[in-house]
Amino acid sequence: MLDTKIKFYKGRVALNVLAKDLANAKEIYEAAEGHVVVGLLSKNYDKIEDGVAEVKEYLKELGVVSVGLGAGDPSQFQKAALISCETDPGHVNQVFTGAGYAAGALKAKGYGRTYINVLMSPTGEPGKVKINTGELSEKEKPAIVDVDTAVAMLKDMKAHSVKFFPMGGLKSIEELKEVVKASERGGLELIEPTGGIDLENFEEILKVCVESKIPRIMPHIYGSIIDKETGLTRVEDVKKLYEIIKKMV
């Protein structure tokens, strides 16, 4: 398995969340006893250099960062890849068509400790996923393929994980079950359910993944735990999510 920078609880589960600033990120990190990865969104940076500088600042304090796109914005795929290949952050989010680009960029820099996920979307049909999640392809007719084929293509691109988004909470849980099974069959070591996850449905979604043989699990929980008035991710909510993890793993 990847020599990861991410601290998984009992080697199995870590949270992926956002933070308003570094102070908020440090509070979150402490609340989850380090079993969390804070995302920094490429969409927030006008220049790659700005993203690189902030990622490095967070890395000094936390040791790991998830370089994100920004609500799955495919136009940010290249920026995310280039920020990552200058920082080896530990985790980078990618659209399906951008994963190979990111893998090549990291490889060229000699970095090998950053997980690359691949964005696949629900279709409403368990066992089928939408893979035209790229900047141009998303505007064309849906490319819906068998999930086993999609996982094989992910591995062809030297990526590591399925980011299944947008799940819409429990709306796509039956589809998640098939993604998890395909990830098992394909030998993936990480799965990342994302979209509409909150304190109410977190346990049910996590259970699907924990009961599988996939070694590592990293659910993304964003807007539902962010205080709308302050923009801060609520530390008490992170603690609640972490308690659920400790109960289940």
Image (tube, rainbow, N blue to C red):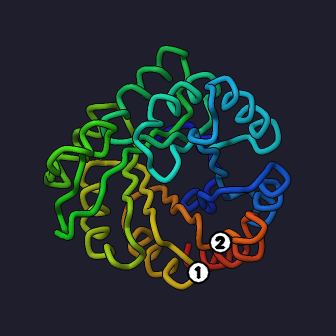
Disc marking residue 199: 1
Percent across and percent down for residue 155 are 29, 37
At x 31%, y 52%, the residue is 120
- Name the residue at 19% across, 69% down: 126
Left or right: residue 40 compared with residue 216: right
Instruction: Look at the picture and state if 61 lies above or below 24.
Output: above
User: Label 2 belongs to which residue?
Assistant: 225
Tell me what residue is drawn at x 55 percent, y 76 percent. Answer: 198
User: On the rendered structure, is 59 left or right of 184?
Assistant: right
Foreground pick, 39 / 176? 39
Q: Secondary structure at mark 2?
A: helix
Few, some or many residues within 10 Å of mark 1 (<14, 14–19, 20+): some
Select label 1 or label 2 by which is in front.
2
Q: Is residue 176 left or right of residue 67?
A: left
Q: Looking at the rendering, in which quadrant would you find the C terminus? A: bottom right
Is residue 166 depicted above or below 100 in this figure? below
Three-letter code, disc 1:
Leu
* Helix, strand or loop under label 1: loop
Gap between marks 1 and 2, in whole Å?
A: 8 Å
Name the kind of residue labelled 2 in the image. Ile
Q: Which quadrant holds residue 176?
A: bottom left
**Whether label 1 touches label 2, CB < 8 Å:** yes
User: Which label belongs to residue 86?
Assistant: none
Task: Identify which residue, 218 or 105, lies in the foreground.
Answer: 105
